[in-house]
Image: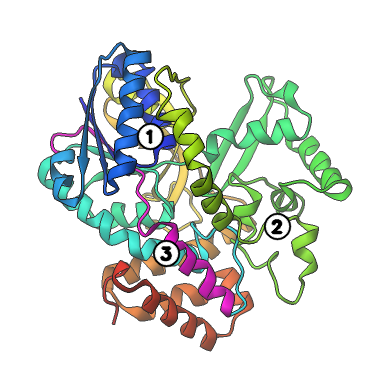
Amino acid sequence: MKVTFLGAGSTIFAKNVLGDTMCSEPLKEIEIALYDIDAQRLADSTLLINSLNQNINNGKATVKSYLGIENLKEALKNATFVINAIQVGGYDSCTITDFEIPKKYGLNQTIGDTTGIGGIMRALRTIPVLEGIANDMQEVCPNAWLLNYTNPMSMLSGYLQRYTGVKTIGLCHSVQVCSDGLLKALGMEDKLDNRKELIAGINHMAWLLEIKDQYGNDLYPEIRKRAREKNLTEKHSDMVRYEYIDKLGYYCTESSEHNAEYNMFFIKKQYPELIERYNIPLDEYPRRCIKQIQDWSIQREELVENKSIGHVRSHEYASYIMEAMITGKPYKIGGNVLNTGYLIENLPQDACVEVPCMVDNTGIHPTYVGKLPVQLAAMNMTNINVHQLVIEAARTKKKEHIYHAAMLDPHTASELSIDDIIKMVDEMIVAHGNWLPIYK
């Protein structure tokens, strides 16, 4: 069995996912192919994964590294699973462009990796790269599963699922930690054990539709009460999602700093007081990038230079999916798949949705959810509209669909005129240069 990790220079994430595989008995004797285009980061990750292999796996895995596009096919050749964790364009210059040009037009963002103008541009520069990877996979590992962790998840996975022939699913860790974090934050830790929950929607805006304790008692009445009280009485980091609970009735999977920019409610020039009221961290992602770059020398010493490094299996889905497919023992995940057959009845069939999926040795099997509460489906549709138009832009190479996507993005449209949206998009396309294909 061979696992190819694309974007292996993401050293901490590579440690989590590949360390997880070494903690799984059926996966210990795998061949690991580490691929990246950055020589130094690839070398760092290779040292770390080799140390893990010796320390927690008795050297049972085989670890090889592959540098540069010219070695991509060899890295993929005969793979059973391909983990995608690439970031096309990086912080400098693409992330800087994604934030600084919109600011000139008065458009502020927090993360910019899922939807909005930042997510749109990130998708447009990533889809061509992923399409090339998919084409190579069909040539050298046609039966492999592509496990995609790269954002914007819904746009990238949706494109791959609609327009390439690879077997693929989008994976995020926000589903696993959703109700756990909520109950702990509200002082309801006693309800954690054997709780029952249902989560469905779209990536980063999937909804905690049901949550019950081990005896089947509905926990939402108490959650709604405590969340409202907490938002009224203290400043905290999850105020946007608690406002969702109060106004929409339900909690969603991804953090408040993400969700603050997925709608037209919170980041508004005419209501600057909302930033303070809801504790919204504008420019959060660039700050994280800068801190990560500054801290890497210390982290490198802790991770790469630490010859005794160990690992405890994380909550990332990848190793559990591989284990289920190899052993046939079923495992439940939250996965991003096409809404084929209306898994969620009131969302489009060609939308990429996040629903419970069962995994076994016959593959990944999405489950039927039914209808979302109408207000939740409506919220999802404001983002799906953007996803669909970005995918259409990537497919047709028509610039007009980039305009359409930005015009229909709820945050962008609530702040800017159509004329300014078009000017901003044009300026961003020019600034991206060769990171984008030619759009006409």
Q: x and y percent of residue 282 in the render?
A: 65, 61
With respect to residue 418, does 108 lie above or below?
A: above
The Cα atoms of the two marked residues, 2 and 3, are separated by: 23 Å
Crowdedness of circle 3 by 10 Å Cα count: few (<14), some, many (20+)?
many
| Residue plotted at (51% across, 36% down) | 298
Q: x and y percent of residue 329 in the render?
A: 35, 18
Q: Which mark is residue 14?
A: 1
Q: Can residue 269 be seen in this view?
A: yes
On the rendered image, what quadrant is the N terminus found in?
top left
Give the residue type at disc 1.
Ala
Among the two numbered marks 2 and 1 on one chain, the one whose residue lies closer to the N terminus: 1
Crowdedness of circle 1 by 10 Å Cα count: few (<14), some, many (20+)?
many
SS under mark 2: loop
The Cα atoms of the two marked residues, 1 and 3, are separated by: 23 Å
SS under mark 1: helix
> How is colour applied across the structure in the image?
rainbow
Q: In which quarter of the image is residue 34?
A: top left
Give the residue type at disc 3.
Cys
Which callout, 2 or 1, points to the residue nearer the camera?
1
Q: Give the range drawn in magenta.
A: 77-104
| Residue plotted at (26% across, 76% down) | 438
Tell me, yes or no, whether the two marked residues, 1 and 3, touch with CB atoms within 8 Å. Answer: no
Q: Can residue 401 be seen in this view?
A: no
| Residue plotted at (43% across, 76% down) | 428
Residue assigned mark 3: 94
SS under mark 3: helix
Which callout, 2 or 3, points to the residue nearer the camera?
3
